[in-house]
């Protein structure tokens, strides 16, 4: 396992498999990366996993764009699972789940996050640019049928648009047996930024139990019949100081932080030019060396001069 200079182990990959998307959500941050190029092939993603699984990376989350725009996504999942990934999960808008849920489960996908930012058809279309709510709801049912559990709903709170649906989405999760993740916008200067502090206090008042998730120090509330998680991204040093993930772009670069574009490390050129596994690992190690919390706790500083291998 590699531990960065700030004492954070790197155990998770967040792999963007495509920059393409069938939606046009106006607040989308596109994983903090706007460069387009040739997408990694399934066998290249599998090789990357084989190399990094020997060094403590065990969990992978597939993102986009919209990952289900990749016709070979099932092959990618299969490659990851056969290459050492203990868990492969997926973030999707859910539009294509009706057709793909079974195949993804059979390929080895463990669980999914479905972005569901409104339960009202008109509001959903306003946010996404697509009249797709009914398809997504059917897709969630199909994913449940094929055992893609637990399903977590990603709900981004947007001022003036959907902030009145917070309890609606929680109760929907309760009825369906889904987990709920409530998310603040990354940009606090946005006119749509809606802070979740007040709602967090409401949850605290009715929760049967509250805990703080080790990964990124997120508060989790166990309510009667549903679990609710709060994600505060912007300006949150606790989130950054607890980060254990490294991002991988669709074109084959390590990206140390969603908020940084100046620390991209190329590994795909090494791979496509006949480089060894050790050279790929060195690119990984270099990216871990560059990692630092974008938002830091006051007075914090690196614990180590270099990356630790443990």
Image (tube, rainbow, N blue to C red):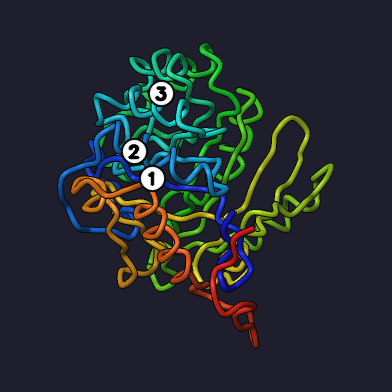
Q: Are marks 2 and 1 in contact (CB under 8 Å)?
A: yes
x 29%, y 43%: residue:
65
Q: 235 and 286: which one is in front?
A: 286
Residue 147 drawn at (x, y percent): 56, 16
Q: 258 and 10: which one is in front?
A: 10
Question: Image quadrant for the C terminus?
Answer: bottom right
Image: 58 above or below 83: below
Q: Quadrant of residue 115?
A: top left
Q: Earlier in the sequence, mark 2 or mark 1?
A: 1
Q: Earlier in the sequence, mark 3 or mark 2?
A: 2
To which residue does mark 1 refer?
A: 15
Image: 23 above or below 253: above
Q: CA distance from mark 3 to mark 2?
A: 10 Å
Q: Secondary structure at mark 2?
A: helix
To which residue does mark 2 refer?
A: 45
What is the residue that sits farthest to the right in this orientation?
208
Q: Secondary structure at mark 3?
A: helix
Q: Earlier in the sequence, mark 1 or mark 3?
A: 1
To which residue does mark 3 refer?
A: 78
């Amino acid at each position: 396992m590699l531990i960065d200079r700030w004492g954070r182990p790197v155990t998770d990959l967040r792999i963007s498999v495509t920059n393409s998307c069938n939606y046009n959500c106006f607040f989308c941050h596109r994983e903090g990366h706007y460069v387009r190029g040739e997408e990694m092939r399934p066998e290249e993603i599998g090789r990357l996993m084989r190399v990094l699984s020997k060094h403590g990376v065990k969990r992978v989350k597939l993102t986009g764009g919209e990952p289900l725009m990749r016709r070979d996504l099932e092959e990618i999942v299969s490659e990851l699972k056969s290459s050492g990934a203990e868990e492969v999960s997926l973030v999707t808008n859910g539009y294509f789940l009706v057709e793909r849920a079974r195949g993804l489960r059979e390929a080895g996908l463990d669980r999914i996050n479905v972005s569901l930012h409104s339960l009202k058809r008109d509001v959903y279309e306003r946010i996404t640019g697509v009249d797709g709510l009914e398809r997504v709801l059917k897709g969630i049912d199909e994913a449940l049928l094929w055992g893609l559990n637990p399903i977590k709903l990603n709900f981004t709170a947007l001022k003036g648009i959907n902030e009145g649906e917070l309890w609606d989405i929680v109760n929907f999760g309760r009825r369906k047996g889904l987990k709920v993740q409530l998310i603040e916008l990354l940009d606090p200067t946005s006119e749509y930024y809606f802070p979740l502090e007040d709602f967090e206090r409401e949850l605290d008042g009715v929760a049967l139990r509250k805990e703080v998730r080790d990964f990124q120090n997120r508060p989790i509330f166990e309510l009667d019949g549903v679990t609710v998680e709060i994600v505060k991204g912007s300006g949150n040093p606790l989130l950054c100081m607890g980060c254990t993930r490294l991002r991988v772009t669709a074109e084959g670069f390590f990206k140390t932080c969603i908020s940084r574009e100046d620390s991209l490390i190329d590994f795909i050129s090494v791979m496509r030019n006949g480089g060894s596994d050790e050279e790929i690992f060195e690119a990984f190690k270099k990216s871990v060396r560059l990692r630092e919390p974008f938002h830091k706790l006051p007075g914090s500083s690196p614990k180590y001069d270099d990356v630790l291998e443990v």
